[in-house]
Image: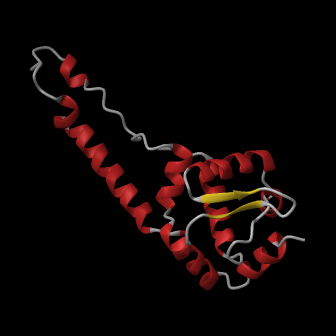
Amino acid sequence: MKMGRGVEWAVHSCVNMSWTPPGEAVNSARLASYYRLPAAYLNKQLQALVRAGILTSVSGPRGGFHLARVPENITVLDVVLALEGAEPAFRCEGILGDVPEADGRENFIRSCLISQTMRQAELAWRQALARQTIAGIADSMERRFPGDRDKAARHLAAG
């Protein structure tokens, strides 16, 4: 499975927004410049997070984006699904039903061992992402890189 680069950008953006004072909007252009990202593409990712209820968009001269929920209630899976969609990564087409002498009554999508293996792997992957919250990542980053929170806050502060 391959995810778009917007997932990385969006998770980092959410972590940065978790470090801003409650209700303070983060300007997407400032966020893009902080990471040297294309502003229009980052804004597109942030808009997808707004549609998913992860971010709130604020218009006006001090506008931008902020988290719509507390960071403890936003999982990495929420972000991935908002950007990549909820469709499964593996789609079994039931080709076992096309082999000679196949039982036409069999549901090969459910009984195929390859399909089961792929579904189990995807379930494990989704569960792992669902256990990781924006707050947890932010806390880990603060412990590992103690100066990053303040550096990001200074760059992103409205001004």
Quarter containing the C terminus: bottom right
Question: Residue at (74%, 45%) from the top-left corner?
Answer: 41
Residue 115: x and y, percent? 26, 38
Looking at this view, name the residue that lies furthest to the right: 159
Residue 102: x and y, percent? 12, 19
The reply to whether residue 38 is in sight is no
Compare residues 146 and 31 and report the one nearer the observer: 31
Q: Is residue 1 left or right of residue 101?
A: right
- Count of numbered marks: 0
Q: Is residue 84 above or below residue 26?
A: above
Question: Residue at (72%, 78%) from the top-left corner?
Answer: 148
Residue 45: x and y, percent? 66, 49
Residue 127: x and y, percent? 36, 60
Question: Residue at (12%, 26%) from the top-left corner?
Answer: 106
Q: Is residue 13 left or right of residue 108?
A: right
Question: Residue at (31%, 32%) from the top-left corner?
Answer: 92
Q: Is residue 1 left or right of residue 26?
A: left
Q: Which quadrant of the structure image shows residue 131?
A: bottom left
The reply to whether residue 68 is in sight is yes
Looking at this view, name the residue that lies furthest to the front: 60
Q: Is residue 132 above or below residue 154?
A: above
Tell me the colour scheme of the image: secondary structure
Looking at this view, name the residue that lies furthest to the top: 100
Q: Which quadrant of the structure image shows residue 10?
A: bottom right
Q: Which quadrant of the structure image shows residue 110?
A: top left
